[in-house]
Amino acid sequence: MGEKGEMTSEDEMMMQDATDDGESFDDDFYSGGDAHESDDDDVMDYDFNDNESDDDSNTLLAHNRSQSNFSILNEADIHKRQEDSITKISTVLSISWVAAGILLRHYNWSVSKVNDEWFADEGKVRRIVGLLENHVPLPDEEELTCGICFDDYPRNEITAAACGHPFCLTCWQGYIGTAISDGPGCLMLRCPDPSCSAAIGRDMINKLASNDDKKKYKHYFIRSFVEDNRKTKWCPAPGCDYAVDFIVGSGSYDVTCGCSYSFCWNCTEETHRPVDCGTVSKWILKNSAESENMNWILANSKPCPKCKRPIEKNQGCMHITCTPPCKFEFCWLCLGPWTDHGERTGGFYACNRYEAAKQEGVFDESEKRREMAKNSLERYTHYYERWATNQSSRQKALADLQQMQTVHLEKLSDKQCQPESQLKFIIEAWLQIVECRRVLKWTYAYGYYLPEHEHAKRQFFEYLQGEAESGLERLHQCAEKELQGYLDAEGPSKEFNEFRTKLAGLTRDIPSVRVYL
């Protein structure tokens, strides 16, 4: 008769204003705000205030990559950029290649930051990073004592970093192997002597580590160029090994990886214009959090008066029996013991005590909370269902686009006796549909957080949203249903050129609406 669940009050997160006057939606706001200026090698800390993914087609990738604010890097590209940076620092500062790599790793691969810090106070940088100015040789003795196992070894079985602290090869291998097994922290390895902070570079790793450990270290070293670099990020698509190098200050944060996945550089979620990153973060958190479950329980259940477990009444009379081990019997309306109820209180389907108490205002607070929760839940459901519907429609449109490219276009070319190059308008229409489904999807997240009291802004937004939806539906119907008639035709159709004009026109009309959303 009842179900258990969890309960909280409705969160009251509000979306920041997208405009100053509510009459237009600023494109800079939707792109994530103004970015910091950057030089060739460095970038200031990003001031980022502001998780479902789709696989876009290769054509969509080509369509979107008209931008020049980012570049795609594969492993070879990353390795080359890394080595170029190391070589540049090694040449300018007149230090070894290994030392240059240690410096860049410490300063997050920022060439300009290394130069600035080094020429401001070289000694301080050397102390912080662990680069000794002079190499300390091993003592000129036939046997030396290892600083870890304290056994004596011939001089050729002992080695040391630049600091000169002697350790046997076996202890070195164990020390390095353990550090590499622990993860990327091995890139900041120091001398095993507790009192020493001398850095251990790739030369020591290559000399002492096992082949497997060398491969792991090299993997960590290359990945650090992306993960520690403020201008570069890995593509968040599952299984993708590409990195994206972004030009800060270029406006939109939308980027498209070589794997065809489009995402926002700022927050690494899927591209989400016209809403800002903060709204996307709140919306995703809301969809995945327990708050809506709890709101549903608050709106549709009541706690057992004895054990306080939430109970849903979905049918039947007002006589409720809690689930074992409680088994308390009570009235659904007034929550009083059922032993005090019967025909004198209204029978099984009414409660005179409840009605009397309600008139006296006894239940006002709890009923008000329940009503607020129900309204909040209904409002959230309204926006979420439409958000999810447009997401599903976009997924289907992507599949239809792929089908059009691989199967239908060639078939249509044969039936209408036209080369495929003259049928590109169909692909452009489907690309427009995919993009507009994405935009419309996120307008519902925007609408959910739009403050209720800003009536003018809400009315303007809902008008634009309605215009975009109706324009997209006309385009979608033309590209799907009307096109099907020409695909099913036995031969060339005289009306095909009229269809071309209509579909191309509907495709062009969409951006004029989308630009405001």
Image: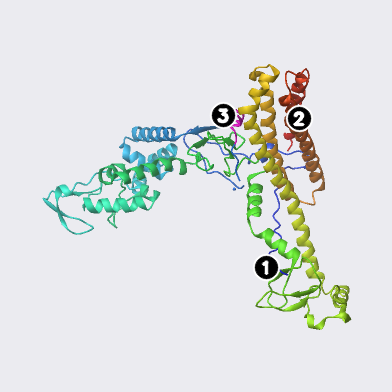
- Magenta stretch contains residue 257: no
Residue 63 sits inside the magenta stretch: yes
Mark 3 sits on what residue?
68
- At x 55%, y 43%, the residue is 46
Q: Nearer the viewer, residue 100 or 271?
A: 271
Q: Distance between the residues labelled 2 and 3?
A: 33 Å
Look at the image and tell me whether residue 515 can be seen.
no
Q: In the picture, residue 79 is in which quadrant? A: top left
Residue 478, disc: 2
Dot 1 amino acid type: Lys
Residue 16 horizontal side relative to residue 464, left or right: left
Q: Mark 1 points at which residue?
A: 4
Q: Which of marks 3 and 1 is in front?
A: 1
Cβ–Cβ under 8 Å for marks 3 and 1:
no
Give the mark nearer the N terminus: 1 vs 2.
1
Residue range highlighted in magenta: 56-66
Question: Residue 132 appears at what percent x and percent y?
Answer: 29, 46
| Disc 3 residue type (three-letter) | Ser
Q: Could you tell which of marks 3 and 1 lies nearer the N-terminus?
A: 1
Q: Quadrant of the N terminus?
A: bottom right
Disc 2 element? helix
Q: Which amino acid does label 2 sit on?
A: Cys
Can you give x and y, in whole percent of width and height, for residue 307 in the image?
68, 76
**Residue 192 spot, x, y in % from top left:** 28, 54
Mark 2 and mark 3 residues within 8 Å of each other at the beta carbon: no
**Could you tell me which quadrant the C terminus lies in?**
top right
